[in-house]
Image (cartoon, rainbow, N blue to C red):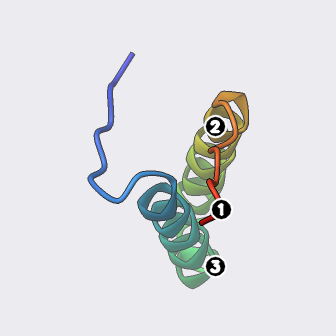
Amino acid sequence: MIALVLPGGTDDAAEVIDALLSSADACEGNAPELAARRRALADQLGDALDTLPRPIHLEE
């Protein structure tokens, strides 16, 4: 298991997922195995985010 600490919270995690998916698209033609691995990592991170409790937004 790897712990990933992101100061920006879930917003930073979403940005990491987007970057993985973009890089998977970019390398699909030359390295399909690498693209598949990056998509799998993005899916795993997304699944992990889905297990977190929803943030509570307090109205002022």
- The front one of 53 and 42 is 53
Amino acid at dot 1: Glu
Amino acid at dot 3: Asp
Horizontal arrangement in the rendering, residue 7 relative to residue 44 (left or right): left
Horizontal arrangement in the rendering, residue 42 relative to residue 6 (left or right): right
Splitting the image into 4 quarters, where does residue 17 fall? bottom right
Report how far apart the C-alphas of labels 1 and 3 lie in the structure: 39 Å
Instruction: Give the x, y percent position of residue 48.
Output: 62, 32
Element assignment for label 2: helix
Report how far apart the C-alphas of labels 3 and 2 lie in the structure: 17 Å
- The front one of 31 and 15 is 15
Element assignment for label 1: loop
Q: Which mark is residue 59?
A: 1
User: What residue lies at 58% left-to-right and 42% top-to-bottom?
Assistant: 45
- Give the mark toward the camera: 2 or 1: 1
Q: Which mark is residue 44?
A: 2
Instruction: Give the x, y percent position of residue 3.
Output: 32, 26
Whether 15 is drawn above or below 3: the answer is below
Task: Name the quadrant of the C terminus.
Answer: bottom right
User: What residue lies at 57% left-to-right and 78% top-to-bottom?
Assistant: 22
Horizontal arrangement in the rendering, residue 56 relative to residue 1 (left or right): right
Q: Compare marks 1 and 3 and give the one earlier in the sequence.
A: 3
